[in-house]
Image (cartoon, rainbow, N blue to C red):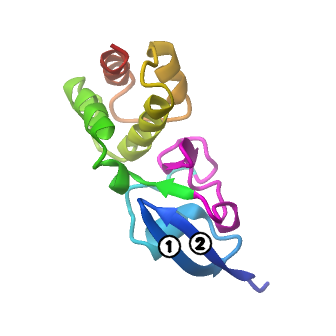
Amino acid sequence: MNDVFFTLHFTVNGQEQTLEVPAARRLLDILRLDLGLIGPKEGCSIGRCSACSVVVDGDSVPACLLLACQVQGRTVDTIEGLREDPLCERISAALVNAGALQCGYCTPGIVSSLTAALRHNPAADVAELEQALHGNLCRCTGYNGLRQAIAELAT
């Protein structure tokens, strides 16, 4: 089967990108393999673990589920771009303070999801932030640290 290539124009972390890619190539592969952005991690490959979550046009989405053709003209922010945002710094500090981090594999997806949620609603309450993390899995720390970080962010 021959891949159908097309010219993809989109913005990643504030930089315009133009790439010749197969239309069916996953955004996760474009970010990691073509652009060298390794923050989003390959986890389940079916959108259930959110280790690959990125912010697309303001919403947190699993990059493993989006195809190149679906991000044409869109804006994508990965953890590499988000880490300069003071909101991301606040989220990271809350996660560290609560001991909600261990191996770090899931952390970029968690930070991306919380950043998108707090950008949409800076006054989000605990329930809203928990809902924002609904699909994010963490196998190392359990969820008590995440709950503590969410409580800190919701205040």
Q: Which tag, 1 or 2, sits closer to the chain's start?
A: 2
Percent of width and height locating residue 86: 27, 39
Q: Residue at x 37, y 26 (%)?
A: 142
Callouts 1 and 2 close, C-beta under 8 Å: yes
> Callout 1: helix, strand or loop?
strand
Q: Please tell me whether residue 112 is drawn above or below residue 52 in the rendered image.
A: above
**Residue closest to the eye, 29 or 88:** 88
Q: Amino acid at mark 1?
A: Gln
Q: Please tell me whether residue 103 is drawn above or below residue 15 in the rendered image.
A: above
The numbered disc on residue 9 is 2
Q: Please tell me whether residue 43 is drawn above or below residue 97 in the rendered image.
A: below
Compared across the picture, whether 146 is left or right of 1 comes to: left
Q: Residue at x 65, y 65 (%)?
A: 72
Query: What residue did someone put label 1 on?
Result: 17
**Residue closest to the eye, 7 or 95:** 7
Percent of width and height locating residue 58: 53, 43
> Callout 2: helix, strand or loop?
strand
Report the residue that reaches farthest toward the bottom: 2
Give the distance between the C-alpha atoms of the residues marked 1 and 2, in whole angstroms: 6 Å
Report the residue that reaches farthest toward the right: 1
Q: Is residue 64 magenta?
A: yes
Q: Quick one: quadrant of the C terminus?
A: top left
Percent of width and height locating residue 27: 57, 63
Q: Amino acid at mark 2?
A: His
